[in-house]
Amino acid sequence: MSIFARLAETLADDWSAHARPEQLEPAGTWNIWLILSGRGWGKSRTGAEWVKSLIVSGKAKRVALVGATAADVRDVMIEGQSGLLSVCADWDRPNYEPSKRRITFKNGAVATAYSAEEADRLRGPQHDAAWCDELAAWSNVQATWDQLQFGLRLGKKPRCCVTSTPRPIKLLKELIARPDVHVTKGKTSDNAANLAETFLTAIVSRYQGTRLGRQELDGDILDDVPGALWSRDMVEACRIPKGTEPPMRRIVVAIDPAISVTETSDATGIIVAGLGDDGHGYVLEDLSGKHSPTEWAIKAIAAYKRHKADRIVAEANQGGAMVETTLRAVDRAVPVRLVHASRGKITRAEPVSALYEQSRVHHVGCFPELEDECCSFEPGSTDSPDRMDALVWAITELALAGFEQLNTFHAPPPGLGRASLVTNDPTTCLPGNVAREVYGAGAFVQPGLASGPEYGGGGSDYLTGWTVTQKWTP
């Protein structure tokens, strides 16, 4: 390509000539450029062009590209329609090495890909600039952000650009309040000239004016819904980083299945949750989405095997026997328990919400869609909170709501399958009460589970009327 052809291509692709004013790097002494906008505003293109301008001008030599997952970084930030490779002219295209997570530019500058799923990869590397995409959807958001900031120390003025659809998470609120953060806000409609008419008709017309539309289209950070059972602060207080959860005693995969797959169909809720050694519940994974019956069965069974779960729990109100048949068609041996909703969603969810208030259920990482459903569902709502329903079934199956603290636990003498229980409430020690399972000295009792010798000895305590299963090692 001749120098004149290159010049013509450069002028034709000049971002400053095509961008809206709010998409150009702001003036001032800011350290972080925070772009909060609706879908389709042009966040990805803005972030990619900003990185390119720093590299071409020589202001940055080592750039970090951080996204929610490795696939997101590759598919959106690097190879996407508005990604870093697409904004570079063919004659000036950098060398992308996916196996090394690295993009090398012709002037020697290097951009490296990082995932919020692996925050520790940011330990050690140093950068003079960073582009963070969809920060509100990161799983280990605080740990990843902290490690990035520790390494953002090269050059005279290292800077960071954050592009994200807003969600009311703690970190975003803190960034907005900082004096060294320049905040740019925008709506989907700002970029209507570059969006497909079908998108504007089908999506914008459907969600405009709704709470979800205010967040996803207008770029608003929404406050808590009055009357909702969950609040953002409640969820944030219960969040822990991945890798810090205790060993799990039990793990279940809960399904709230959709019986059809159309544009207007509900999603299928699939939540993996566990009961930790500390007696607390832990939400481990959210695999929900619009899936065909075979697809959600495959996903649920794969999660059952991956997490070495105890069973799959599935709501059978709509599908009935079809739900179990679908699961058995994928794996005949998988243990399945069908549950039926005899009470309303709010009534079923209230005990689970109370456990969050007591800090007895924790989110291992970030689950944006699940948390949005929980914090926006209120009495009288006509929405179908599929993820929330699956969460409620999972926590209910783990029977956290039925735990009572034990004052004492007397292990039986060798060879005897009997135990003596003393609870905080003496009225519970009456014959005929529900079966309970004991998990350890001074720990908790759990209703609804029968005894079994596989737990290390079991039998009836004829003094209290309990059926007791002991996890006890002599």
Image (cartoon, rainbow, N blue to C red):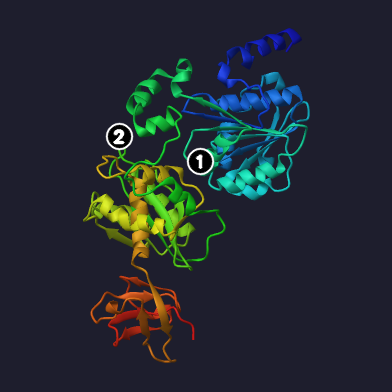
**Which amino acid, mark 2?**
Thr
Q: Sort mark 1 into few (<14), some (14-19) or many (20+) by Cα contacts within 10 Å.
A: many
Extreme residue in the left direction: 342
Marks counted in the figure total 2
User: Where residue 87 sits: x, y (%)?
Assistant: 63, 22
Image quarter of the N terminus:
top right
**Would residue 294 be visible to someone looking at this image?**
no
Residue 137: which numbered mark, if any? 1
Q: Is residue 299 left or right of residue 30?
A: left
**Would residue 437 be visible to someone looking at this image?**
yes
**Who's the residue at 34% across and 23% down the image?**
205
User: Where residue 153 sits: x, y (%)?
Assistant: 74, 39
**Who's the residue at 33% across and 67% down the image?**
402
**Who's the residue at 43% across and 48% down the image?**
287
In the displayed structure, 54 sits above or below 256; it is above
In the displayed structure, 448 sits above or below 130; it is below
Q: Is residue 14 left or right of residue 435?
A: right
Residue 434: which numbered mark, if any? none
**Which amino acid, mark 1?**
Ala
Tell me the element at label 1. helix
Tell me the element at label 2. loop
User: Where residue 89 sits: x, y (%)?
Assistant: 67, 19
In the displayed structure, 94 sits above or below 318; it is above
* Location of residue 243 by image quarter: bottom right
Q: Which residue is mark 2?
A: 264
Closer-to-camera residue (236/54): 236
Q: Sort mark 2 into few (<14), some (14-19) or many (20+) by Cα contacts within 10 Å.
A: few
Give the distance between the C-alpha atoms of the residues marked 2 and 1, in whole angstroms. 24 Å
**Who's the residue at 61% across and 20% down the image?**
24
